Image: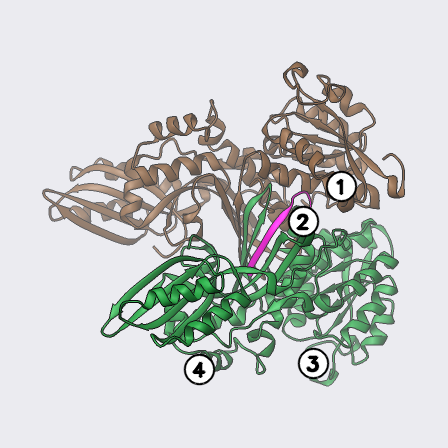
Chain colours: A brown, B green
Amino acid sequence: MNGEGDSASVKVALLGYGTVGTEVARLLHEHAADFTARAGASIELAGVAVRRPDKHPDVPAELLTSDATALVESDVDIVVEMIGGIEPARTLLLNALRAGKSVVTANKALLAEHGAELFAAADTSGADLYFEAAVAGAIPLLRPLRESLAGDRITRVMGIVNGTTNYILSAMDSTGAGYSETLEEASRLGYAEADPTADVDGFDAASKAAILASLAFHTRVSAADVHREGISEVSSSDIAAAKALDRTVKLLAICERVNGAEGGEAVSVRVHPVMLPRRHPLSSVDGAFNAVYVEAEAAGQLMFYGQGAGGAPTASAVLGDLIAVARNRVAGGRGPRESAYAALPVRPFAETCTRYHISLDVADRAGVLSQVAAAFAAHDVSIAAVRQRGRNQDASLVVVTHAATDAALRSTVDEIAKLDAVHEVVSVMRVEGGEP
Amino acid sequence: MNGEGDSASVKVALLGYGTVGTEVARLLHEHAADFTARAGASIELAGVAVRRPDKHPDVPAELLTSDATALVESDVDIVVEMIGGIEPARTLLLNALRAGKSVVTANKALLAEHGAELFAAADTSGADLYFEAAVAGAIPLLRPLRESLAGDRITRVMGIVNGTTNYILSAMDSTGAGYSETLEEASRLGYAEADPTADVDGFDAASKAAILASLAFHTRVSAADVHREGISEVSSSDIAAAKALDRTVKLLAICERVNGAEGGEAVSVRVHPVMLPRRHPLSSVDGAFNAVYVEAEAAGQLMFYGQGAGGAPTASAVLGDLIAVARNRVAGGRGPRESAYAALPVRPFAETCTRYHISLDVADRAGVLSQVAAAFAAHDVSIAAVRQRGRNQDASLVVVTHAATDAALRSTVDEIAKLDAVHEVVSVMRVEGGEP
């Protein structure tokens, strides 16, 4: 920090100048007086590290550098990292934290893979590590989990945390179109990246789930612990089957406190598509919006809703952190440290039980239901409800199960698919929310 | 604080042992190990001040005292105030803060009336003043406004922050019953206090609106600045009129950044019933639940939803604050101080413009609409939409206005009520959300 009292200022290094970085710089400039009053110090942008300084004529030349390492090593107090990805972000942030410089980042992948290492570096030097923007963009979510609910026992966090997949599923639901053509349209409109893998295959949501589970349950969960299924297998038949049941398909990140081995506690952390009843509050979260449900023993049910991505919304979260970190620098004190004391095991997905909807096209004749039911019974999958509807020689048969493991369900479906009377397995999908 | 390092502990005085105080004590005991790990110090209940110690056989006798003043003056580090009301709470908390003891309170009335004095005392001694439980119970809302959104410019906060009135309005909506009988039923079921004045006349919501506006706009708003209308004038005709328009009636606290005198900024803070479109997210918040919408320039729209009252939910918020305050004590540092630098004027309600729905029973004959329209024009109230529906000799006429002041609207309605062709002014109600 330079100076004291009224003249206090904190120097900020901005790494990366994409959509979010641009907004952070713009708002820092536009609201400078407000931010000074709120932080108790003026927040000065001391440098902006970009790959190609010549590509950013809008940034004062004296701030631009292509040497992020040197910028981090200069006399800055806070490093705001907007580069994304693992390297060089990891090395840059470790260097910053080890040198006692506080870090604000939105880098979910880095936190989900190397969070422990970053927290340890922050702890050793007494620096702050803030990352509200890493999950659910503008929605204040991590601070509530980390601080507001610190006096409670969170049992479940379930949310829509990826805007691209939510946009695609919403569009499939409203148009009836298939996955591939909807993805193409989403790319054309800028709702999906040129390489959409991180989003559609669930990697982005899995990183966020790891971060949410770690904070909610005071334990350490990394991206590798998260069971991950994307949306590329979701077909228009799945969407139609959901519609017929007054349900909608969403890609959810689900973090649960569950029973572990030998009577202990464990956590289950997973990302996969589910059918939700249309009256479920998460069901009406459309397009690029995010929403997260939290259940805690004392607080009961909570929901947080807002924009999960975009330059300005993400910048809002980054700047909230930046002001908190600056205030800590000026006033003395630190934000919360990593809280992983509970050290809960992560239950393997194979042992995780969920409910399923299975939609089948079957021959409309006597005995079909009994054959299908026998297949479920053979694999110990308990049936909660069955609905059959004839149409000409075909019938549609919908089976809703009680909670079952993935393995048991797969074996059941494999057996059912081989039955003569079963023309097609139209849709197999997990179910959350509401009664079967 | 007693001791350092592993043996650090903070001593807590609990003032009041009602529904919330009981839960706070129970959870402190039940989750002691977790809370120690999260706060970095054991949190010890050092005393419980109640009016009648003999009425609390469940509390260890050595903790009980009827002398709250002495308990606050003893060697406690943190005072948790659950008494409510202005005195003796005000004097006790001022004494605590002046002595450098941090305070956690849910006392919205005290904060809305004497917040400035309390903040000043906290500031002088360097103590913390936390009050998440004062607004919207278990919902993490004040910390997000105070901290997460500190880097943004909040333009509007609008919410359902009183469970009793929301329960009554929800019940009137679903049963069609009148206000008085619904209030009686709510009292019988324990959803309304024996003396419901603070809730039904909007005092409770007004205190909360003052706190929300102060935090959202970095200014000082006290309860007296808040325009307040309760729900006792809401009739079954109003509810029926809302239903006919696919709307629902809610008591909202509304805090807005508005244009002030001479091109400056101001705030408008008010509590009154409004009609909301049924598709508005606040419209489906039923019973004792609370929900708050926040609009900020960068973040866009955010919503927070959860239980607004009750022992355990409120205790969740109190304990989150208690752990934060304990952590600050142990780690050094402080939470955010009062941020009132913006010092915005509060715009008088007379100058505040809102939209209205007016439902009239009129004679079904030519010329009526032109007489009614002339009355609106005479008072400069602009009409956005009109819907007329005949039934026998009567017709129902619904007028939706553009934004108008309360005074202009009242004069208009007074004139309309005198028209021969107008049989009855069925309902006059403000409107928020959606297109007219």
Residue located 28% across and 43% down the image: A241
Q: Nearest the camera: A112 or B250?
A: B250
> Residue B126 location, x and y as percent?
85, 56
The x and y percentages for residue A290 are: 50, 43
Numbered circle sitting on residue B56: 3
Which residue is tagged 2? B263
Q: Amino acid at mark 1?
A: Ala
Which chain contains the residue that carries disc 2? B
Counting other residues with Cα less than 10 Å from the Cα at mark 3, is it few (<14), some (14-19), or many (20 or more)? few
Chain letter for mark 3, please.
B
| Circle 4: residue type | Glu
User: What's the CA distance linking mark 4 and mark 2?
Assistant: 48 Å
- Tag in front: 4 or 2: 2
Inter-mark Cα distance, 2 to 3: 58 Å
| N-terminal label among 2 and 3 | 3
Q: Is residue A67 visible?
A: yes
- Residues marked 4 and 2, same chain: yes
Picture disc at residue B181: 4
The residue mark sitting in front, 2 or 3, is 2
Task: Judge whether residue A213 is colored magenta.
Answer: no
The picture quadrant where one finds residue A75 is: top right
Tag in front: 4 or 1: 1
The residue that mark 1 highlights is A33
Give the dominant element type of the magenta stretch: helix, strand or loop: strand
